[in-house]
Amino acid sequence: MPIFEFECKDCSNQFETITKGQEKTCCPQCNSCNLKKLISTCGRISDDSRCNWDDPSLPSKKEFQRERF
C-alpha cells in the first residue's frame, strides 16, 4: 500500500497516510477532505547527475534535497 503526503487546504496541516485505492482521505487534525497531494521523496541515495534539473515540468533539485540528511 502506498504512503502519500498531503497538506490540508483549510488548516495547513501536513501529514502522511496509507491510502487504499480510491479511498477518500481527510485531515486528521480538522477532518476536512480539502487536501493537496504533495510531492514526496523516498529516502534513497542515487546519482542525480543524469537528472534534467532544468526541466520546468519537474520539481527543482532543492525540493528533492530537502529530505536528505
Image (cartoon, rainbow, N blue to C red):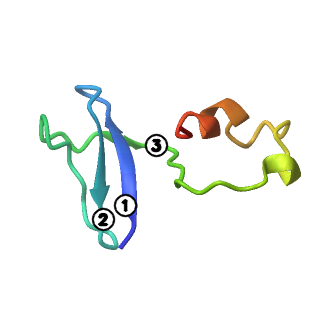
Residue 3 numbered mark, or none: 1
Amino acid type at mark 1? Ile
Q: Which mark is residue 19?
A: 2
Label located before the other in sequence (3 or 2): 2
Q: Position of residue 6 (x, y in %)?
A: 36, 43
The kind of residue on which mark 3 rests is Leu
Q: Earlier in the sequence, mark 1 or mark 3?
A: 1
Residue at horizontal 12%, vertical 34%? 30
59 up-or-down from 18: above or below: above
| Mark 2, secondary structure of its residue | loop
- Which quadrant of the view contains residue 58? top right
- Name the image quarter holding the N terminus: bottom left
Q: Could you say which quadrant of the image residue 65 lies in?
A: top right
Q: Which residue is mark 3?
A: 38
Left or right: where does residue 33 sit relative to residue 67?
left
Q: Is residue 55 visible?
A: yes
Residue appearing at x 30%, y 72% in the figure: 20
Q: Residue at x 34, y 73 (%)?
A: 21
